[in-house]
Amino acid sequence: MMRIRRIALLLGLLACLFASCRKDHFDVNNVHGVNAEGELLLPIGSGSFTVSELMQQFNIDSMITCSEDGILTYGFHFEDFGVVDGDSLLRFKDLEYNERFSFENPFPIILPQAFDTMFHFEHTIVFESDNIHVVEAEMETGHFDFDVKSNVGLLQRLVIHSPDITDEGGRDLELDFDLNSSDIQFDLDGLHYETDTANTLHLGYDVYVRLQSLPAQELFFEVDVKGSELAIKEMSGFVDSYESRNVLDTTMNLFPGNASGSLQVQGARLKLYERNTFNLGARLDLDTAWIIVDDEAPYSIFGPQPVSVSVPPLSNFGQVFERSLGGKISANETGVYTVSNFIVNPSGMSNMVSVSDTSVIDVMIDAEIPFAFAMNDVRFVDTTDLNLKIDAPEQIEKLTLELTFTSMIPLGLNAQFFAYDSETGKITEALVAEDRLINASYDGNPVTTEVTLEITGEKVEHVNHSDRLISVYEIDTDAHDVCLKGQQQLSLFVKARVKYKGTVEF
């Protein structure tokens, strides 16, 4: 029996040839004391099954729905989470900031003895960001590095404080550093930030020095600040239009890898669902959406481009787009290439909003593809095990298999069958060389096909030493637009006509 690995329209027909659903067998093993001379006709078996039963047999019915009138639809589901995420939005650029505090020394003097004193300075750091203006935030990560230089005595301590940053207890930031240390750094992880002017940080410096002599005409303090990995967990503020560009370049394999050719799908329906947990509306602009089939020119999935879809804030998935489409797909590999932009706050609204690093835009796509298509010379090659061991084959002059197919399935099939010996790697016998095996039913009425397979005594010997059956199928719809339905049925009746050499006793 054929082993099916993937769901495809093609396999639905091919499997019909080897399915064993509801099969009746005629057992001749218990016939004794009968002499047969010349020729003996034996009914071997019969069976019938519908397309729906066939899909159940190969466990693919979970991917297919069947309407009340029997129309079959293949369902394809795709999810892409985090096409836009708040974590990428809520980041400041790394910064390098320098501030020089200088003043004239009116009385350059040498002090009679050293003494300790403190100088106080203040300045404001401005954070740079392409998209956010933060008024209040919970910091996720980030750290500042400080370096202080001066010609005013011996530097001893640096105390940094800010009314804009508070710890978990609500206390204003105040950090004390030994200036004899080469590492002056503080982390922002988990701290609360709040300011009166967006994207600014007010800092105060208390520099403790030991004065001994002040010979220079100009006295200065210079502070270098480096900030890096500045990211926010959650913020309140203003968000400019934020654009995320997405490119999808992939392939779909709806058919088994050893199929070739193409078919024209009709009446497929694509539904786009999105979830937008930002407190801001968004828009999807789809610039390019191509199907790439073999060496042919790519064609647009939607056309004409571009497609623009509004995405309001949605806590759960909501449908934002639906379209019917049709076109050619490859039997083995169909490429999909799309270029799209997601724009958060596309209208540039200036209302204060809250955004967190867990805010996302997620995409979910459902494709409903009815089994309605036109097929153009699709070929499929399959190999199955062959376990045919005939005792005393030398007594058989000719073995003829008579197959009667009664089909209501709108697909025509040509087939070739070859016996193959895997030990020698050779084809041992051509059983059928390109013949119409099943005639299609395009008008809904049963169509009968008679197929005769003749295996001479010599071929019996060859087949008896083969362990594989190679099947080559060519399927088309003879330029008809067809639709597979669940109740469409294929029936098979098989008789064996055996011609013996002389008289054989059972």
Image (cartoon, grey):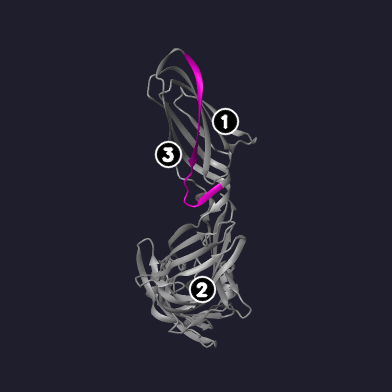
Cβ atoms under marks 2 and 1 closer than 8 Å: no
Q: Is residue 378 left or right of residue 135?
A: left
Above or below for 174 versus 85: above
Q: Disc 1 on helix, strand or loop?
A: strand
Cβ atoms under marks 2 and 3 closer than 8 Å: no
The amino acid sitting under disc 2 is Gly
The amino acid sitting under disc 3 is Glu
Foreground mark, 2 or 3, reads 3
Q: Which of 34 and 447 is in front in this view?
A: 447
Count of numbered circles on the image = 3
What is the magenta segment's predominant secondary structure? strand
Above or below for 412 versus 111: below
Numbered label attached to residue 96:
3
Whether residue 125 appears in magenta in the rendering, the answer is yes
Foreground mark, 2 or 1, reads 1
Q: Name the residue beneath numbered marker 2.
A: 12
**Residue 481 rendering spot, x and y as whole percentages:** 48, 83
| Label located before the other in sequence (2 or 3) | 2
**Residue 180 rendering spot, x and y as whole percentages:** 46, 22
Residue depicted at 54% across the width and 83% down the height: 408
Q: Name the residue beneath numbered marker 1.
A: 174
For mark 1, does the 10 Å Cα neighbourhood hold few (<14), some (14 to 19), or many (20 or more) residues?
A: some
Q: Give the range drawn in magenta.
A: 114-134
Cβ atoms under marks 3 and 1 closer than 8 Å: no
The amino acid sitting under disc 1 is Glu
Quarter of the rendering containing residue 361: bottom right
Q: Which of 283 and 380 is in front in this view?
A: 283
- Report the Cα–Cα distance between label 3 and label 1: 21 Å
- Report the Cα–Cα distance between label 2 and label 1: 73 Å
